[in-house]
Image (cartoon, rainbow, N blue to C red):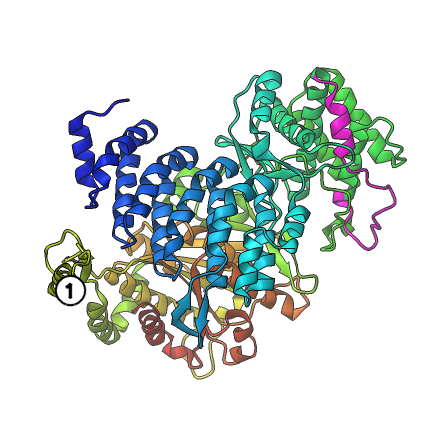
Amino acid sequence: MSLSEADIARYRSQLSCNFGQLDDLFADCMEEAALLLSEQGTKDYLEGASQICRIGRGFEPVLVYLEEMPFVAHKLGEETLAYVSRTIWTITRTPNGRSIPDFMQTLPEAARRLLSREQFEHYVDLVMDMMARTSTSIHGNQSDTFPSPGMPALLKNTPYLLHQLSLEGLRNWVDYGVLHYNNHPERQIDYFSLQSADSRAVLQRERHGTLYADHERKLDLYTKALWQTKVQFVPYSEGWDELRKPMPYYDPLGMRIPDVYDDRNGIRGIDRYRAAVAHMSAHQRWTSQIVADNFSPFQRVAAELLEDSRVEYLAMREYPGLRRIWLTLHPKPGEADCDPQRQSCIRHRLAMLSYAILNPDHGYRNPDIIEFAQRFHEIMAGGESSTKEIASLALSFIARTRRQEDLAANVYFTDTEVDYRDDNRHMWLFIEEDDEPDDFEATRKVKEEEEEVDGLPPRHYPEWDYKTKTYRPDWVSLYERLHPSGDGMKIDALLSKHEALAKRLKQILDMLKPQNYVRIRYQEEGSELDLDVAIRSLIDFKAGHTPDPRINMSHRHDGRDIAVLLLLDLSQSLSEVPEGASQSILELSQEAVALLSWAIERLGDEFAIAGFSSNSRHEVRYQHIKGFEERWDDRVKDRLAAMEAGYSTRMGAAMRHAAHYLSARRADKKLLLVLTDGEPSDIDVNDQQLLIQDTHKAVQELDREGIYTYCINLDPNADDYVKDIFGNQYSVIDRVERLPEKLPQLFVSLTK
């Protein structure tokens, strides 16, 4: 593709950069960019180059960006352009600005070797973390920082290191150098220059396994030759901490596989890749989706395992050589390894069944394992069978072998993980609903008088066991539905009752509304001249320095961008009337929520309302009262008027489900307000600390997702436990009758 002079001139006008050297090279750079990028990508590319031109580091960073970034964006996606320019801007605010060209020159090799945007971003995070940890300061004063001594050496050697190590290995090598030489600049330079003995020793220690980047073409040809498919492989690293260890899987975007495999049991790393790819390719050819709603967690695990065995059986019919690799990599659990009196042995039994199906000489004596392995082979002898038929066999196996002890939190895991197999997400069809109550009603046609358990299928959430420091997977079943309607005129009457309070709130809310303009300085183009910057630029120009071209300013509205979800505890205790009060806590809560909703609607913030209660871990009820897209209107008032108290308070699962909806909002700030009158509890829990610690864990999970959680507690004795759950993010209202006044004021103070 050849660009005309008019095209070159048009693109040049979009690049805000006045270096004279640029004119000689710009046309060549744009030829490559136009060939590799879309029109929007080209626009982002020029915008990123303009931003780098403004950092004040001369022409070299701009040139490196223009030369290298089209390839990186083409390889990893055009979103990388903005990500890299933001990263460069961040580095300029550190003392390591001189390393920017070296850093950018490592990006093409990182894109070639890491092959996915997720891996690429991990690499950038690694560099930024090393930079922050090795930059030194004087007397702890952040303004007196020195550049990282080892950063230039690390960046110089990065292409070589990426060819020698996996991303996890590179991180371990960098961590060793930072940990041991952070206070020795000269030795730090020697380490990252690969000059010191321990540097080379650690490199040798971390240099292991078969790197996917070295065998990408082989695997591509393998899938084309054996499976007649063209697959996009997306590698991931197992070295970054996650809640659960990542597993291979495939979806419409490609196959996710580890970036490195070690040799195991005489099977080379490349053959482990072939085993994983063959397994997923077999699923692509023979697995069909089934609806997940009517399967319990145990039934789903069993169905997945037998479907894994089915597609492997069919693949081995076509390619018998796969049996040796899969059989060698499949763990062989001992029949007596798991004690059912002390542990949950469900995974152990399923692993034995899987091995018995794969290896006719399994040697097990368990009659159920023998019978169901035979039934599997009888089904497969009749043809390909189907996913649905194999799922029925899995249900029979669970029904036959399930024990009460399988519900124990202490699950036996040794020799039960078949790590070349994927996580089977492709196998299930989940009937999920949008977060709008109207959609629940329209899609499911749930009558308002039906119970929750008769409406939408349950969602399953983990629960934290503070004694074992582990999650109980899929422990809680949560049922959601649209709240029934009542007489909305009751809510209008409550608002009229608090008319004087509403007038006082109106004065506060009018001041919080986004109505003022905010000045945005340092703009190359703007609505007016920024006189201070212009004078400073003129002085620089007279002194022979490059003047700052950002001499204009513009204005924007000082807007609020907040999403709020109010989560109401609707447990039985809300029906009580506090001492000295004339109304129940539930009635006071209705008044307070009505006033708060009126206030938030007036501010224009996104908000939703939901209530929850529980009847053991098998039935947590979550009721939608107002959706984010709904207005504060008569339909919402009708639902609020029908609020009733009942059952218990299993708070952690309800908060995790509320976060499921809040995290999908595109607001800058996300707030979960929890209104409750007591501590978490449920009828099937005897340990008082269990649900308190689980709710505290849920607060930590939401915090990691960027959701700020705040509790308004109506229990006079809440100080005994609420701090353990919410830290300092809570308020206790001792006089419950003042709730209608306090709740809107608390919201205003939290969001102003």
Tell me how many marks there are.
1
The image shows residue 689 at horizontal and vertical percentages of 64, 69
- From the viewer's perspective, is residue 657 above or below residue 672? above
- In what element is the residue under mark 1? helix
Q: Residue furthest bottom?
A: 580
Q: Residue at x 64, y 63 (%)?
A: 683
Name the quadrant containing residue 108: top left
Residue 612: in magenta span: no
- From the viewer's perspective, is residue 31 above or below residue 319? below
Locate the C terminus by quadrant.
bottom left
Q: Residue at x 23, y 35 (%)?
A: 24
Name the quadrant containing residue 258: top right
The residue beneath circle 1 is: 536
In the image, is 146 to the left or to the right of 53? Answer: right
The image shows residue 593 at horizontal and vertical percentages of 36, 66
Q: Nearer the viewer, residue 547 or 708?
A: 547
The image shows residue 415 at horizontal and vertical percentages of 77, 43
Mark 1: amino acid: Arg
What is the magenta range?
319-347
Q: Residue at x 68, y 32 (%)?
A: 272
Q: Is residue 272 visible?
A: yes
Locate the N terminus by quadrant.
top left
In the image, is 92 to the left or to the right of 129? Answer: left
